[in-house]
Image (cartoon, helix red, strand yellow):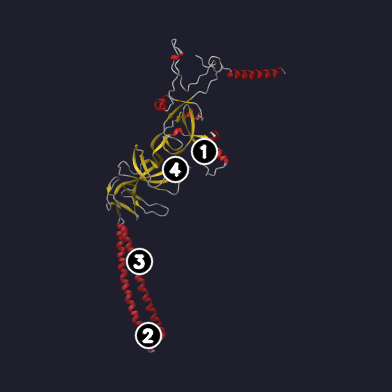
């Protein structure tokens, strides 16, 4: 029972002390009319700030890629044969029609000679068949005359008619055999020409995969053929970039771009988007979907060579002389943490969106803070495009506003109406302009030393907060 009584007494004492302090706070001193007890005020939050700037801002999409020639031809053989001669090496410049490779043609030469002999033989057989047909026609005509005069029997006439039809069929057989042999001869002649491989374009031998003496084969449905070499036209280069699925909706043909080679990451090479794939691909073992985007390298820079790795920056949006602020100035706040006026203004802009109440309550709203007098004022903004350093503010900000940009800890604690003071670095930049608008000096009060009177001391800073038990009396 004694423990309960002690608790009650303690509670009563605490309530009494609180009431006494509150009453003393209301009591004012007779000399200066200040409260007898002066409760410490809110300490001003030190912030960095900057004025908005008008500047050109570019939104970029970055992606990795590989360099290749716009026109690159893989040289393969159309016949199975051994390489007899290869007069070129990697890096050689070739013109259209120059000899690249000569294959063994001995088997084809023999096949052509055999085909020629076969055609001659069939020609002779055709002549013989035509002679036999003429004889059969004469014999058949004579038998018909004899039959009309009843000088022969029908069986003999039928045999002559059969012989005539066989002779006609043999002539047709010889003709078709000749057609087949001529077609085979044509194929062998074409294959013989294919033993000499010439360059189809002007370019450079970029890669050689086969050597003299090796046998090259033709490709089939399941097995690729031998690629002897590659010829690249280095006067026109392109980059095949892999754009992430998040960024690809913003990429369009003809957009300007810059290419940075791994060999010289500080040098930008001008390019433009040619086309964007309509279907994404996923690398083996990865869940990231990318879209192949083709960019043409503008100009003829000799440092851009096939097979190089590169990173591309595509300009998907651009604003000239836009109102911009540092990206760190724009913060996200839950709608329940914002003033009612800001929330209503935001909802008015989002009235056309079909959003559930639950999702609405979970929304984060983009705002920034400006410094008004000695307080932070929240602003609902409409951000535009952004780059890595600055963001466009399309609505909600004027050029004369002082935007709070940091530090991060201060921005995280900042609320609408919170007392703020500029950091030393921001003072050096903004104080001359702030003095013109009446937001004058933020200086510390100098204490009177060596018997100085209070009137000789420097005036206190406008945003200085003093806490003392006797009302701040020196």
First along the sequence among labels 3 and 4: 3
First along the sequence among labels 1 and 3: 3
Q: Residues within 10 Å of mark 2 (few under 14, many from 20)?
A: some
First along the sequence among labels 3 and 2: 2
First along the sequence among labels 2 and 1: 2
CA gap between label 4 and label 1 equals 30 Å
Give the image location of residue 283, x and y in percent. Answer: 45, 44
Q: Secondary structure at mark 2?
A: helix
The disc label shown at residue 345, or none: 1
Q: Which residue is mark 4?
A: 247
Q: Which residue is mark 2?
A: 144
CB within 8 Å, label 2 to label 1:
no
CA gap between label 2 and label 1 equals 113 Å
Give the image location of residue 205, x and y in percent. Answer: 30, 47
Q: Secondary structure at mark 3?
A: helix
CA gap between label 4 and label 2 equals 91 Å
């Amino acid at each position: 029972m004694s423990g309960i009584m002690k608790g009650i007494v303690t509670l009563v004492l605490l309530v009494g002390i609180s009431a006494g302090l509150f009453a003393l706070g209301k009591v004012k001193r007779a000399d200066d009319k200040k409260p007898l007890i002066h409760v410490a005020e809110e300490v001003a939050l030190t912030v960095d700030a900057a004025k908005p700037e008008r500047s050109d801002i570019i939104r970029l999409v970055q992606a990795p890629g590989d360099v290749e020639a716009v026109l690159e031809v893989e040289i393969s053989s159309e016949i199975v044969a051994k390489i007899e001669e290869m007069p070129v090496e990697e890096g050689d410049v070739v013109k259209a029609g120059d000899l690249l490779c000569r294959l063994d043609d001995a088997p084809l030469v023999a096949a052509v000679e055999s085909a020629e002999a076969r055609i001659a033989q069939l020609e002779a057989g055709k002549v013989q068949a035509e002679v036999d047909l003429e004889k059969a026609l004469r014999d058949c005509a004579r038998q018909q005359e004899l039959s009309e005069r009843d000088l022969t029997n029908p069986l003999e006439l039928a045999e002559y008619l059969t012989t005539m039809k066989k002779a006609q069929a043999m002539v047709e057989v010889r003709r078709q055999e000749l057609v087949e042999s001529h077609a085979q001869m044509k194929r062998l002649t074409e294959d013989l020409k294919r033993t000499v491989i010439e360059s189809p374009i002007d370019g450079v031998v970029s890669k050689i995969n086969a050597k003299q003496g090796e046998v090259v084969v033709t490709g089939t449905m399941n097995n690729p053929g031998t690629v002897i070499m590659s010829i690249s036209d280095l006067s026109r280069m392109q980059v095949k970039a892999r754009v992430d699925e998040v960024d690809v909706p913003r990429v369009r043909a003809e957009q300007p771009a810059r290419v940075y080679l791994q060999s010289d990451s500080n040098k930008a090479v001008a390019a433009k988007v040619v086309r964007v794939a309509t279907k994404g691909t996923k690398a083996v073992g990865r869940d990231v979907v990318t879209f192949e985007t083709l960019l043409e390298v503008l100009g003829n820079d000799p440092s851009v060579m096939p097979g190089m790795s590169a990173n591309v920056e595509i300009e998907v949006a651009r604003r000239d002389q836009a109102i911009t602020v540092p990206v760190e100035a724009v913060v996200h706040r839950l709608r329940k943490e914002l003033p009612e006026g800001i929330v209503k203004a935001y909802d008015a802009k989002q009235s056309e969106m079909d959003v559930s109440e639950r999702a609405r309550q979970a929304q984060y709203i983009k705002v920034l803070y400006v410094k008004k007098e000695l307080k932070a004022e929240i602003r609902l903004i409409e951000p535009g495009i952004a780059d890595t350093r600055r963001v466009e503010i399309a609505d909600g900000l004027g050029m004369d506003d002082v935007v709070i940009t940091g530090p991060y800890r201060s921005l995280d604690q900042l609320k609408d109406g919170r007392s703020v003071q500029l950091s030393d670095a921001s003072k050096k930049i903004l104080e001359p302009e702030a003095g013109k608008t009446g937001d004058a000096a933020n200086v510390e009060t100098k204490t009177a030393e060596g018997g100085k009177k209070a009137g000789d001391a420097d005036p206190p800073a406008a945003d200085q907060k003093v806490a003392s038990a006797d009302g701040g009396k020196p």
